[in-house]
């Protein structure tokens, strides 16, 4: 028998989360799948879906501020996301079918901490910061340092993910997203990549590439970023970035794909991104 | 009346839309107990002990059944008697049922099943065709002199073609409900073949003296997966009902359904083909190997169909085909739409493409030269009748899809392709044939029966054990009977497929229902009409008057194979099938050069169905089967590691979504079969035969990568591309 | 156990359940048999219902989150006479075969037509990508939804 709480303020939710057995739930699209497989029941759940503090997308001093409770349907349709965070809007459209997008939240995708989470490479590429709320108040942490190991996060006992803050990309920032999935829709990633960069005097600056399904956590492709920084995005740069990306990852064989394919496709996606960069 | 050739909608459609159709999981009441299955944890070994004490201690209400509790022999009779009801001693595959549990709720049944401990002594399993050696079945065809022809040939071309496990993924998982009441054991379930289960239960429960009754519930898809497997789950539900004294429902969730039920046989087909310089086939030397899994079940007849179709729809004077099914330690592989013919014709069609490529002729010409004409002789010595339309479906499809022009355009575009990341277009063609009805002497032995009875109000009722699990059998039967009686289809009632109410019409398999059982019903209806006589009043009035004067009005007919249509199973000579369907698929794909992801864009199909009783339903069969075939070629896969299926849930066991599905353009060709009064041929399975090779050909046209095995996933295509010599 | 009030197809129901029980099971136990389990993990869409007008998989909704909500199943979308445009298009086009996916398809298609009364083929494919069908190859389902849209437009 589970006790279910439906708090209507973040403060109440945080107080309820002080119970060490309490599990925070939102769209439940990962949680109930895992429960089915394991037969697990929960002693207490705290529902985050009524918290106003976790809702909405707003622009706040050069930052796009996304509520952790935003569903992927909301993100797909949101005008701020569509105009400034096109790669996030694209990622949102690739997650599950319509039914899943109506329930699954960005916060859930982050906290569930799957290495294949489709929104996560975008957060790396766009340098997102997470706002976490706990009994000690709120703190901010770079998304990049949030995922520490396979399904392990920096979230402390009782802490909740509240907002996701992404610096508003400048008008010269170029961004891209590509999911290589198991099929055209309702797919899990074999490789998922997001990239952002800006062009100054024809050369690449601020290059950030995030990739998923290649390691226990989503990863930055720092070697490829390094190869590209300061370069003109020509065919040679694209090939060099592809080689660097392939060399810096250690993917695995699993039921969805092979290490060999993942590495090969990753390089091609990065290469195609670079060749597509236009000022 | 002119109702044949029209498309009245199915009568159960509204109930299905609203959710009131009554599937087995809808039938369980509040007092119905639930069953659960305890399965083995190793692929091979010995059961040393089964201990249910903990389960009984935790929940004293639960009932546990093991092989020791069986009333009679521990066997589900199919072709041979080697398929146990429950593992007893020897373990032959992972997740083999070893004990059953019933409890008042599903949760309690599952909790109890988890507490039943099974002590096993593992041994080394045999897995994969390379390791397998025990032969479960074999057969061969010898026609002409292959060795001499190959020795003298201008060209001898060899190829090996493989295909893996395929899961049915009927959307409704397996389920059965059973009760024992007043000496009658009744089982209601999701199934294709009520009399198969009837016979299985008669064998398992023989010593109890129970009368057995089997009824089909509304069934949510089958594709062969609910042909023989229901014998097992049906027997399990029945055992639990008998032992517990309650009505028991046994439902598999998706995971259990995937790990515990049959799959399409993995196959390896090797060809050695002699051809002349212009591409004419001189000799075919073919070997077909199937992975049967742990038990014989239906494998001999799957093999038989695979072997007879293995040469493809092509005339050839010298043919040798050897087929074997080998035993491995996985769940038994079984019936799946096409029944071996898709696997063997994948080989035939990829071999034809290879021959064309080697000789520098195009794929259409290679097929045109060799396709069967009427009067040609098949490898079993059967002379093909006047409804042989291989060329017609080939030309129709090629023309509608503008195949040759586009194939040539893509061939040159590939060479000059820019490195722009744009998807590469490919187009491929494949031709296939499929025998309708049971193979060889099967229908003669089966002696299928069906009938019509007319109630006192003059309403005719169909009596048949043929089941509708999506195809639309019911409305097609209504149309056939309506035509013969001169009434409207909705005036014809359908008795439920219930072994207490209807005769044994044989199983609903093998593309036989409309052709064989439909013909029986047509004959029965003609007989009724003959008795009642014609007149100005509606049939119902005439029939009611006839009954008032003469008593009950009923006609039952039995299938009789025409004289001369014999088949010798020892030599594999004779009439293998009463009729053949013919199909041609042109598949168009685009392939992303950066990821090798294949997207089917459009499939153009022409299929000779003999006569389409209900063209919309008929085309619907072809469309659904076509997508299954195309997806088998590039997407669908069940990987098996140490006897364990890795793709054991729908998140990993993939079938196409709407976004994966190509546009389907199906053209029905109607060249009536002389074998039956209606001219119909089978349509259920043939769409499975051509889609896969056409898809591989399209991928080859787009990329230059000649895959010889399915599924051609991006991972496999990458290996082929990079490892090519 | 806790008490949950739901409005199912316009009818108010009160259930005593564990709050984490799946909405799928609660609805089926309440007699809504058009909510069908095909996978239990949100892959097949057979259990699609509208939860406050949004299509969701009932297998992935704990009942407590549906407390007080309006839920619409296929029986609330397709009238008993089958007279509405969607039902008649599905029947006429042959979009129904085995029926196991059908109620879920009806619910999703209904939600699409409410949101976008004149969808093109790609919009229909997109909306139905979360509803697996194994029988039809989808062709007749897509045609049926497009036909229903046209019929509704003509009727209005």
Image (cartoon, rainbow, N blue to C red):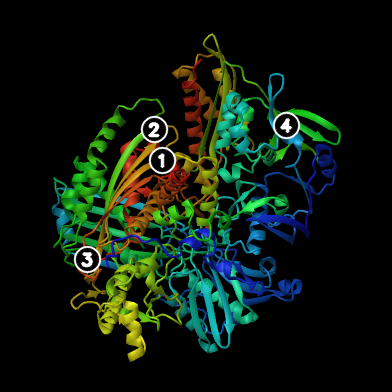
Label 3 resides on the chain identified as B
Label 1 resides on the chain identified as B
- B593 with respect to C113 (left or right): left
Report if the CB atoms under discs 2 and 1 are less than 8 Å apart: yes
- Crowd tier of the residue under label 2, counting other residues whose Cα lies within 10 Å: few below 14, some 14–19, many 20 or above: some
- Crowd tier of the residue under label 4, counting other residues whose Cα lies within 10 Å: few below 14, some 14–19, many 20 or above: many
Give the percent coordinates (x, y) of residue B35: 62, 71
Label 2 resides on the chain identified as B
What's the residue at 22%, 50% (across, down)?
A: B394
Which residue matches tag 3? B673
Residue A163: numbered disc: 4
Is tag 2's residue or tag 3's residue first in the polypeptide sequence? 2
Is tag 2's residue or tag 1's residue first in the polypeptide sequence? 2
Q: Quote the CA–CA distance across marks 4 and 2.
A: 39 Å
- B263 with respect to B412 (left or right): right
Depth check, mark 2 against mark 3: the one in front is 3
Q: Quote the CA–CA distance across marks 2 and 1.
A: 9 Å
Give the answer, above or below, for where B241 lies relative to C33: below
Give the answer, above or below, for where C102 lies relative to C130: below
Residue B423: numbered disc: 2
Looking at the rendered structure, the secondary structure element under dot 4 is strand
Query: Which quadrant is home to the C terminus of chain B?
Result: top left
Give the percent coordinates (x, y) of residue B296: 42, 70
Give the percent coordinates (x, y) of residue C59: 63, 54
Query: Which quadrant is home to the N terminus of chain B?
Result: bottom left
Residue A155 visible to the viewer: no
């Amino acid at each position: 028998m589970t006790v279910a709480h439906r708090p209507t303020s973040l403060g109440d939710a945080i107080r309820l989360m002080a119970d060490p057995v309490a599990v925070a739930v939102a769209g439940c699209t990962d949680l109930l799948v895992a429960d089915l497989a394991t037969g697990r029941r929960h002693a207490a759940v705290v529902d985050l879906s009524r918290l106003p503090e976790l809702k909405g997308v707003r622009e706040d001093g050069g930052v796009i501020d996304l509520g952790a409770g935003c569903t992927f349907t909301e993100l797909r349709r949101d005008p701020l996301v569509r105009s400034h965070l096109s790669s996030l809007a694209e990622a949102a459209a690739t997650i599950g079918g319509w039914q899943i997008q109506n329930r699954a939240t960005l916060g859930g995708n982050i906290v569930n901490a799957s290495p294949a989470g489709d929104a996560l490479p975008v957060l790396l590429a766009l340098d997102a910061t997470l706002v976490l709320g706990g009994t000690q108040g709120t703190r901010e942490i770079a998304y990049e340092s949030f995922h520490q190991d396979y399904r392990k996060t920096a979230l402390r006992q009782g802490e909740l993910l509240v907002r996701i803050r992404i610096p508003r990309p400048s008008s010269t920032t170029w961004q891209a997203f590509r999911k290589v999935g198991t099929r055209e829709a309702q797919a899990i990633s074999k490789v998922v990549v997001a990239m952002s960069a800006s062009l100054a005097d024809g050369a690449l600056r601020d290059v950030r590439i995030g990739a998923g399904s290649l390691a226990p956590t989503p990863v930055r492709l720092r070697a490829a970023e390094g190869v590209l920084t300061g370069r003109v995005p020509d065919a040679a740069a694209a090939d060099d970035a592809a080689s660097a990306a392939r060399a810096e990852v250690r993917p695995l064989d699993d039921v969805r794909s092979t290490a060999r394919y993942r590495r090969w496709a990753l390089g091609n996606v990065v290469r195609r991104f670079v060749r597509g960069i236009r000022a | 009346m002119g109702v044949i050739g029209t498309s009245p909608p199915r009568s159960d459609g509204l109930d299905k839309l609203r959710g009131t159709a009554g599937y087995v999981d809808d039938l369980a009441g509040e007092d119905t107990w639930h069953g659960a299955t305890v399965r083995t944890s190793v692929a091979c070994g010995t059961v040393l002990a089964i201990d249910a004490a903990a389960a009984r201690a935790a929940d004293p209400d639960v009932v546990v059944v093991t092989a020791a509790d069986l009333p009679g022999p521990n066997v589900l009779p199919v072709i041979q008697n080697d398929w146990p009801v429950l593992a007893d001693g020897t373990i032959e595959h992972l997740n083999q049922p070893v004990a059953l549990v019933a409890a008042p709720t599903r949760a309690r049944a599952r909790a109890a099943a988890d507490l039943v401990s099974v002590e096993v002594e593992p041994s080394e399993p045999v897995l994969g065709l390379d390791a397998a050696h025990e032969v479960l079945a074999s057969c061969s065809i010898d026609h002409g002199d292959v060795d001499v022809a190959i020795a003298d040939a201008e060209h001898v071309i060899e190829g090996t073609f493989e295909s893996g496990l395929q899961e049915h993924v009927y959307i409704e998982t397996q389920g059965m409900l059973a009760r024992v009441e007043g000496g009658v054991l009744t089982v209601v379930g999701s199934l294709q073949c009520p009399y198969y289960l009837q016979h299985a239960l008669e064998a398992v429960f023989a010593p109890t003296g129970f009368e057995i009754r089997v009824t089909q519930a509304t069934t949510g898809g089958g594709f062969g997966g609910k042909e023989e497997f229901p014998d097992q789950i049906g027997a399990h539900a029945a055992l639990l009902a008998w032992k517990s004294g309650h009505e028991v429902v046994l439902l598999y969730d998706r995971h259990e359904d995937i790990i515990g039920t049959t799959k399409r046989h993995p196959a390896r087909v090797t060809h050695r083909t002699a051809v002349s310089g212009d591409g004419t086939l001189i000799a075919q030397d073919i070997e077909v190997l199937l992975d049967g899994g742990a038990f014989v079940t239906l494998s001999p007849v799957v093999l038989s169909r695979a072997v007879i179709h293995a040469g493809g729809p092509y005339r050839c004077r010298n043919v040798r085909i050897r087929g074997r099914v080998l035993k491995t330690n996985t769940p038994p592989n079984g019936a799946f739409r096409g029944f071996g013919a898709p696997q063997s014709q994948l080989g035939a069609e990829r071999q034809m493409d290879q021959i064309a490529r080697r000789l520098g002729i195009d794929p259409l010409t290679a097929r045109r030269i060799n396709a069967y004409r009427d009067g040609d002789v098949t490898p079993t010595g059967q002379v093909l009748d006047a409804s042989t339309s291989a060329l017609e479906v080939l030309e129709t499809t090629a023309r509608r899809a503008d195949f040759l022009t586009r194939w040539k355009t893509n061939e040159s575009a590939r060479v000059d392709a820019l490195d722009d990341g744009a998807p590469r277009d490919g187009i491929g063609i494949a031709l296939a044939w499929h025998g309708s009805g049971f193979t060889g002497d099967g229908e003669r032995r089966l002696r299928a029966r069906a009938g019509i009875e007319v109630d006192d109000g003059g309403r005719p009722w169909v009596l048949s054990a043929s089941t509708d699990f999506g195809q639309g059998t019911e409305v097609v039967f209504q149309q056939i009977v309506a035509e013969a009686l001169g009434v409207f289809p909705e005036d014809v009632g359908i008795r439920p497929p219930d072994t207490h109410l209807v005769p044994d019409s044989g199983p609903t398999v093998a593309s036989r229902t409309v052709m064989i059982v439909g013909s029986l019903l047509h004959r029965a209806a003609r007989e009724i009409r003959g008795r009642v006589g014609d007149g100005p009043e509606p049939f119902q009035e005439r029939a009611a008057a006839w009954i008032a004067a003469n008593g009950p009005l009923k006609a039952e007919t039995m299938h009789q194979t025409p004289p001369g249509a014999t088949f010798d199973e020892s030599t594999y000579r004779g009439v293998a099938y009463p009729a053949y369907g013919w199909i041609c698929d042109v598949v168009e794909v685009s392939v992303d050069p950066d990821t090798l992801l294949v997207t089917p864009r459009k499939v153009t199909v022409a299929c000779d169905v003999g006569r389409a009783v209900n063209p919309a339903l008929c085309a619907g069969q072809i469309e659904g089967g076509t997508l299954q075939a195309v997806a088998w070629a590039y997407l669908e896969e069940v990987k098996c590691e140490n006897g364990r299926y890795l793709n054991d849930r729908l998140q990993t066991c993939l079938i196409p979504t709407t976004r994966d599905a190509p546009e389907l353009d199906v053209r029905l060709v109607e060249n009536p079969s002389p074998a039956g009064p209606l001219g119909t041929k089978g349509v259920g399975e043939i769409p499975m035969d051509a889609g896969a090779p056409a898809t591989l050909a399209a991928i080859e046209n787009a990329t230059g990568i000649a895959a010889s095995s399915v599924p051609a996933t991006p991972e496999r295509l990458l290996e082929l591309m990079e490892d090519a010599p | 156990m806790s008490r949950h009030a739901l409005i199912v197809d316009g009818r108010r129901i009160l259930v005593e359940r564990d709050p984490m029980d799946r909405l799928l099971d609660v609805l089926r136990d309440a007699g809504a048999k058009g909510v069908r389990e095909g996978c239990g993990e949100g892959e097949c869409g057979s259990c699609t219902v509208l939860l406050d007008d949004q299509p969701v998989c009932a297998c992935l909704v704990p009942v407590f989150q549906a407390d007080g909500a309006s839920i619409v199943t296929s029986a609330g979308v397709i009238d008993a006479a089958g007279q509405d445009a969607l039902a008649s298009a599905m029947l006429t086009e042959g979009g129904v075969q085995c029926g196991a996916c059908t109620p879920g398809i009806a619910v999703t298609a209904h939600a699409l037509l409410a949101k976008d009364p004149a969808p093109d083929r790609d919009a229909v494919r997109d909306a139905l990508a979360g509803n697996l069908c194994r029988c039809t190859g989808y062709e007749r389902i897509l045609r049926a939804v497009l036909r229903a849209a046209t019929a509704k437009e003509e009727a209005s």
